[in-house]
Amino acid sequence: MDYRLNVTYITFDGHVKVHKYRYLYFVIMFMVYILIISSNVTIVCIIMIHKNLHEPMYIFIAALLINSVLFSTVIYPKLLIDFLSEKQIISYPACLFQWFSYYWFVGSDFFLLSIMAYDRYVSICNPLQYTTIMQKTTVNIFLISAWIVPACLFSVTILVSAKREICTFHLKGILCNSTVLTLHCVRSRTLNIYGLLNFVTFLIIPVLFILFTYSRILVVLYRCRGVRRRAAQTCLPHLLVLINFSCLSAYDILLARLEPDFSNIVGLIMALQVVIYHPIFNPIIYGLKMMRIYDHLKRLFCKMV
């Protein structure tokens, strides 16, 4: 009992008229969550079942979609509980865990997008060496690194934050992300600098690397017209996902440092865009634009009909 009395709770202040529209919010977000899970899991299962999709590019796509499921599972169950609760609160340790998981999967996504860009670069610019470079061992190392490296780097921020004193117990938002820094009594310069280094490591550098690889691909496409169609079919989805994800992530990561004076309605809309667009956008883009996946989806739905 004493332990429970000593637990620090954080109140979410970003909800808009949740007591009036709680059931509407719950139904909408529950349907979105089911759509995210079903669409991502369907494509992952298709990639796992069909042997002609057991290639590095599709394995990386499956890893990206698994990240979307895990990311959504960290966010949506808590949101659904909050919609039906009288008070929208979370314990500080649980808030730190959500914060860690949130950026762990965001960082992992950027690593995976960089790996996918490199995979396309090798496939189009050095096709004769592709099987030599992208071996099973290499693919496994890439996948493990994409999950382990972000986890290790972001855990430092969480461990340091856990030891800092908090003076504010109201979080302007609907989930625990970089805005947790605003709870601290004194803003840590070390945490700010380390956070900016992570921002450069997980967003700026991957985006620059991806843009560099695709610029090289464009040079090859300009010279070799025969591979333009095939390259466009595989590269365009990656670029669309990158643009969407980069814009949302940049806004979210810089939010706590810029501290814009948004109304709750604007803040809620922006927060929902971050947690809805990317997990739904990925399976739609890869399901419709990747022809092999699209063909298997058509066969699946034809059998169901």
Image (cartoon, rainbow, N blue to C red):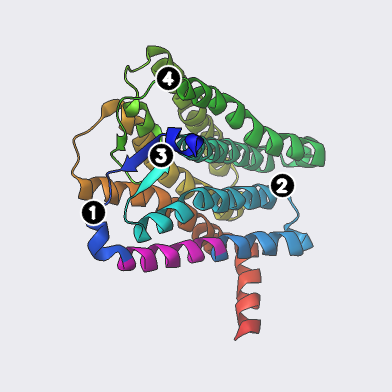
The type of residue carrying mark 2 is Pro
Q: Residue furthest bottom?
A: 305
Q: Position of residue 97 (x, y in %)?
A: 51, 37
Residue to which mark 1 is pinned = 16
The residues bearing labels 2 and 1 have C-alpha atoms spaced at a distance of: 44 Å
Q: Is residue 143 left or right of residue 12?
A: right
The type of residue carrying mark 3 is Cys
Q: Please, is residue 21 above or below residue 86 in the view?
A: below
- Which one is earlier in the sequence, the residue at label 1 or at label 3? 1
Q: Residue at x 58, y 31 (%)?
A: 150
Q: Nearer the viewer, residue 123 or 110?
A: 110
The residues bearing labels 3 and 4 have C-alpha atoms spaced at a distance of: 16 Å
Q: Which mark is drawn over residue 176?
A: 3
Q: Residue at x 52, y 31 (%)?
A: 206
Q: Which mark is drawn over residue 56?
A: 2
Q: Is residue 164 left or right of residue 60?
A: left
Look at the magenta stretch and give its main secondary structure.
Answer: helix
Residue 191 occupies which quadrant of the picture?
A: top left
**Mark 2 surroundings: few (<14), some (14-19) or many (≥20) residues within 10 A:** many
**Mark 4 surroundings: few (<14), some (14-19) or many (≥20) residues within 10 A:** some
- Which one is earlier in the sequence, the residue at label 2 or at label 3? 2
* Callout 1: SS: loop
Q: Which residues are magenta?
A: 23-37
The type of residue carrying mark 1 is Val
Q: Position of residue 244 (x, y in %)?
A: 41, 46
- Which one is earlier in the sequence, the residue at label 2 or at label 1? 1
